[in-house]
Image (spheres, rainbow, N blue to C red):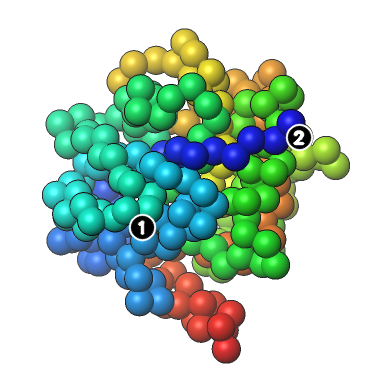
Amino acid sequence: MSVRPTKAMILAAGLGVRMRPLTDGMPKPLVRVAGRPLLDHVLDKLADAGADEAVVNVHYLPDQIINHVKKRKRPRVIISDERDEVLGTGGGVVRALPLLGSAPFFHVNADTLWIDGVRPNLARLAETFEPARMDILLLMAPTTTSVGYSGRGDYGMLADGALRKRREHQVVPFVYAGAAIMSPSVFAGAPSGEFSLTRIFDRANEQERLFGLRLDGMWMHVGTPDAVNAAEEAFLASVA
């Protein structure tokens, strides 16, 4: 049986080092692409997917993000303040778990950006997520059609969606697109303090409870100032 998450976690605490000089005086989630901050693109997609609340963690230049989302009604934004501590992608979620509740939730990176195909990808994730057989469902973008990505990929994917992590010298066809659905139970026994979400993904993978869904549309890797221009060109082309 599928689920429809009503809560979301947005990772917005990164330093945005590779995005400098754009992030010298601005957190990366507020960098504008196609006229809107990256964070607003994400929040709009979550609102369309039925999320009522979004927990946004902050660390670098936190007040700018806090002020930006103050008036947001849908989803309503709850701040998880990490300005005094670097917690990493995994530790940030663990800190926010009491705000997220016991049901599966959307998990989205604040700097991820994609153009939906025929059907919204977050709605597709919700329809595909099956708590009985999966703990995490990742949105996976094909590396060959992604804008601004030149890496070797993250996972191979089996016919049923089960993921297989890339080995050191391997090239695989899919990259994690920065959006997922997760069950809070997958964080049972997680360490306190700073750690990477990759550790949680790996554990779910070992237990054969990590799955992927192929993104319908186009994913844009907005990691550098140059990538902003490429993403804007892709956006313009999509609405032309």
Crowd band around label 2 with a 10 angstrom C-alpha radius: few (<14), some (14–19), many (20+): some
Residue at the image point whose x is 72% and y is 22% from the top:
132
Instruction: Kindly check if marks 2 and 1 are in contact, taking CB atoms under 8 A apart as contact.
Output: no
**Residue 180 sits above or below residue 70 on the image:** above
Residue at the image point whose x is 48% and y is 73% from the top:
231
Residue carrying label 2: 162
**Residue 181 sits above or below residue 31 on the image:** above
Q: Is residue 51 left or right of residue 213?
A: left
Residue at the image point whose x is 26% and y is 48% from the top:
15
Confirm whether residue 112 shows in the render: no
> Along the line of sight, which residue is nearer the eye, 150 or 237?
237
**Residue 191 sits above or below residue 111 on the image:** above
In terms of secondary structure, where does tag 2 sit? loop
Residue carrying label 1: 39
> Along the line of sight, which residue is nearer the eye, 35 or 26?
35
**Toward which corner of the image does residue 9 lie, by quadrant?**
top left
> Along the line of sight, which residue is nearer the eye, 140 or 68?
68
**Residue 10 sits above or below residue 64 on the image:** above
Residue 92: percent from left, percent from top: 34, 31
